[in-house]
């Protein structure tokens, strides 16, 4: 068990958007932050903007060699990991240049491309679990550690089954359902690890204007990052939490229904 006081974090997809804001906040609060980015140069640019204890690391969570190299780098430098923030995700893998609503209409269960569905789930579900599994030994080496996975209330089956939810029309079979699957996988992991020193949390940033939705979200990236940053910095949240920003069903920081 590692007793070193240096807090070490890895944020996937941290070169832009919510991931960048999380990495910045962690560095400002004394963490040594590995800024995960598929494109190393973009990661370096982001780390330079953040400054302090931020350092770029090449990481494509759909590439086993990339995962292995990233884990090896963290292991060689520290031998443990305090915090893993699973932020990397994609919303579509189809034709470029479409509006958010065009993408959603193309991703309805009755018409969606199965190939596109597989590509999105490969990142959002399988890749996210792959990097988590690979880093679990290092997380277990820390005195206490946490896994924070950026999900979405769009994946909530309870909310999408509610006819009063005006956003339920945006629940598609590709991105939205990938978040449902992600929630299930990480709730399973939370249950598995509940008697260990590794806590698991899920967090929704809300409808944030990022590349995931062609920047058509209603909240700024700074607003959408507030709850993920709160969860990433907090060390006293109960294992297995799923929280989000204020919605018609939850208060700020309130539990999102599964």
Image (spheres, rainbow, N blue to C red):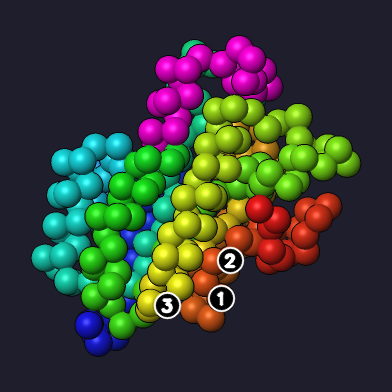
Residue 164 position in % (x across, y down) = 88, 41
In this view, which residue lies farthest toward the left?
76
The quadrant in which residue 197 appears is bottom left
Looking at marks 1 and 3 on the same chain, the residue that comes earlier in the sequence is marked by 3
Looking at marks 2 and 3 on the same chain, the residue that comes earlier in the sequence is marked by 3
Left or right of 202, for residue 158: right
The quadrant in which residue 136 appears is bottom left
Quick check: marks 2 and 3 in contact, CB under 8 Å?
no
Neighbours of disc 2 within 10 Å: few (<14), some (14-19), many (20+): some
- CA gap between label 2 and label 3 equals 15 Å
Q: Which quarter of the image is occupied by the N terminus? A: bottom left
Q: Main secondary structure of the magenta part?
A: helix
Q: Is residue 134 above or below residue 61?
A: below
Q: Secondary structure at mark 2?
A: strand
Question: Was residue 16 drawn as part of the magenta stretch in this picture?
Answer: no
Q: Is residue 66 above or below residue 144?
A: above
Which residue in the structure is indicated by mark 3?
A: 195
Image point (67%, 46%), residue name: 156
Residue 32 position in % (x across, y down) = 30, 70
**Over which residues does the magenta segment extend?**
101-123
Q: Secondary structure at mark 3?
A: loop
Quick check: marks 1 and 2 in contact, CB under 8 Å?
yes
Q: Is residue 100 above or below residue 137?
A: above
Which residue in the structure is indicated by mark 1?
A: 238
Neighbours of disc 3 within 10 Å: few (<14), some (14-19), many (20+): few
Q: Is residue 234 above or below residue 100?
A: below
Which residue in the structure is indicated by mark 2?
A: 241
- CA gap between label 1 and label 3 equals 12 Å
């Amino acid at each position: 068990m590692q007793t070193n006081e240096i807090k070490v974090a890895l944020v996937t997809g941290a070169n832009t958007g919510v991931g960048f804001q999380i990495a910045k906040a962690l560095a400002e609060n004394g963490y040594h932050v590995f800024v995960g980015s598929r494109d190393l140069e973009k990661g370096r640019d982001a780390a330079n903007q953040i400054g302090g204890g931020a350092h770029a690391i090449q990481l494509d969570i759909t590439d086993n060699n990339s995962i292995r190299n990233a884990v090896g780098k963290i292991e060689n430098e520290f031998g443990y990991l305090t915090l893993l923030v699973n932020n990397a995700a994609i919303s579509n893998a189809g034709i470029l240049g479409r509006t958010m609503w065009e993408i959603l209409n193309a991703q309805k269960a009755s018409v969606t491309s199965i190939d596109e569905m597989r590509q999105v789930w490969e990142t959002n579900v399988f890749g996210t679990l792959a990097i988590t599994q690979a880093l679990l030994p290092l997380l277990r080496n820390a005195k206490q550690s946490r896994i924070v996975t950026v999900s979405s209330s769009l994946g909530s089956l309870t909310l999408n089954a509610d006819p009063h939810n005006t956003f339920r029309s945006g629940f598609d079979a590709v991105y939205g359902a990938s978040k449902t699957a992600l929630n299930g996988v990480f709730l399973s992991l939370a249950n598995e690890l509940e008697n260990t020193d590794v806590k698991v949390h899920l967090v929704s940033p809300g409808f944030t204007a990022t590349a995931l939705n062609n920047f058509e979200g209603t909240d700024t990236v700074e607003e959408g990052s507030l709850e993920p940053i709160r969860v990433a910095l907090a060390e006293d949240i109960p294992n297995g939490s799923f929280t989000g920003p204020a919605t018609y069903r939850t208060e700020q920081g309130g539990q999102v229904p599964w």
